[in-house]
Image (cartoon, rainbow, N blue to C red):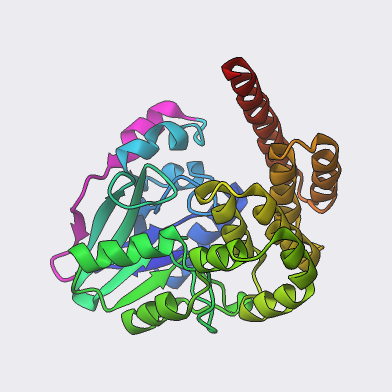
């Protein structure tokens, strides 16, 4: 989370976690900033790592600032619909909050203009400081080898097109324990795009190799790619690029398998490998791999979410097969 201190009030950007986490944050802020209450809660998008429990905030008369596209999803997180409606402030492009000295400006990124993970993704600018708060659009490992995905390019494009005064980015999805920095300069952002792991380059490289050649090269590829990034997420982005953009399931399967084998204790690589196996028609193998993914998921809520996602995937693939059969 990011806390913005104004002359007479506070504003908080991002509130992940459960109600206990939200109450703890409110109590900590009351101790750290005596005499200043939290007046606004903002978030970048509707995913739980950006905004989860909201009732503790609303109970303290905090105004929830969110874009119109988030309303339906976010409202379900409150047990008091009437209080929610009275507390919500629908943010459109350029909404400004300030105290006459400092200001924060909400910018709404439309999915139609820039590829972002939700319909309306917001970033919050502090013009006087030349800073921009972003969520999971930009995660910057110190080695600069994070994947150069559409989200990162979207944020960079939006800043270049509309916010020339931004000199640094505050990344709320960053974590020092994971080897990332909380604040990145635009120079570093540029360097990240230059040196990062590019899915299209990986796809071109594998496309130039036969499947047998890839299979033989998997140990060397694994050593090379895991040296460039310690995050299975980065490699899965590359595998999904092969799967979705290139529609090359056989090569996507090999890269996903490389990722699963390189990170055997992480559930997500196994989950995505299962998707690819299911789409390739190997249902039995998919279910076995998904069982492994579930076994690695200890958190009850995360496990339930994964099971729901798997069931949606089964239905989607079944529908796709039915449509293909009808077309024949």
Query: Can residue 33 be seen in the rendering of this structure?
Result: no
- What residue appears at the point 52 percent right and 64 percent down from the top-left corner? 199
- What residue appears at the point 42 percent right and 43 percent down from the top-left corner? 58
Q: Quadrant of residue 82?
A: top left
- x%, y% of residue 128? 19, 75
- x%, y% of residue 121? 36, 50
Left or right: residue 66 compared with residue 289: left
Q: Residue furthest left?
A: 100
- x%, y% of residue 10? 33, 62
- Let me know if residue 81 is in the magenta part: yes
* Residue 217 vertical placement versus 23 (above, below): below
The image quadrant where one finds the C terminus is top right
- Let me know if residue 288 is in the magenta part: no
* Residue 96 vertical placement versus 66 (above, below): below
Span shown in magenta:
80-103
Query: Can residue 78 be seen in the rendering of this structure?
Result: yes
- What residue appears at the point 57 percent right and 59 percent down from the top-left corner? 237
Tell which of 1 and 8 is nearer to you.
Answer: 1
- What residue appears at the point 26 percent right and 45 percent down from the top-left corner? 91
């Amino acid at each position: 989370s990011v806390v913005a201190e104004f002359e007479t009030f506070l504003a908080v950007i991002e509130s992940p976690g459960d109600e206990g986490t939200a109450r703890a944050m409110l109590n900590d802020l009351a101790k750290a900033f005596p005499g200043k209450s939290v007046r606004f809660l903002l978030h970048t998008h509707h995913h739980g790592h950006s905004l989860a429990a909201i009732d503790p905030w609303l109970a303290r008369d905090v105004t929830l600032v969110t874009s119109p596209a988030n309303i339906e999803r976010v409202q379900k997180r409150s047990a008091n619909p009437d209080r929610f409606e009275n507390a919500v402030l629908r943010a459109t492009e350029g909404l400004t909050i300030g105290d006459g000295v400092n200001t924060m400006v909400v910018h709404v990124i439309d999915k139609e203009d820039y590829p972002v993970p939700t319909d309306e993704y917001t970033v919050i600018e502090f013009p006087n400081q030349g800073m921009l708060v972003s969520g999971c659009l930009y995660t910057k490992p110190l080695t600069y080898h994070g994947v150069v995905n559409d989200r990162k390019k979207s944020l960079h494009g939006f800043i270049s097109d509309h916010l020339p005064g931004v000199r640094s980015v505050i990344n709320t999805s960053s974590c020092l324990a994971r080897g990332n920095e909380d604040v990145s300069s635009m120079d570093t952002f540029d360097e990240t795009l230059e040196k990062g792991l590019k899915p299209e380059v990986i796809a071109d490289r594998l496309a130039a190799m036969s499947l047998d050649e890839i299979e033989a090269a998997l140990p060397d590829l694994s050593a090379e790619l895991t040296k460039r990034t310690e995050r299975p997420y980065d490699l899965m982005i590359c595998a999904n690029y092969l799967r979705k953009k290139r529609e090359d399931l056989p090569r996507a399967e090999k890269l996903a398998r490389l990722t699963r084998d390189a990170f055997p204790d992480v559930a997500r690589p196994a989950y995505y490998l299962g998707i690819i196996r299911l789409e390739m028609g190997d249902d039995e193998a998919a279910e076995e791999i998904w069982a492994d993914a579930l076994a690695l998921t200890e958190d009850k809520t995360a496990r339930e979410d994964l099971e729901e996602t798997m069931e949606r995937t089964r239905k989607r693939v079944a529908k796709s097969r039915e449509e293909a059969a009808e077309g024949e």
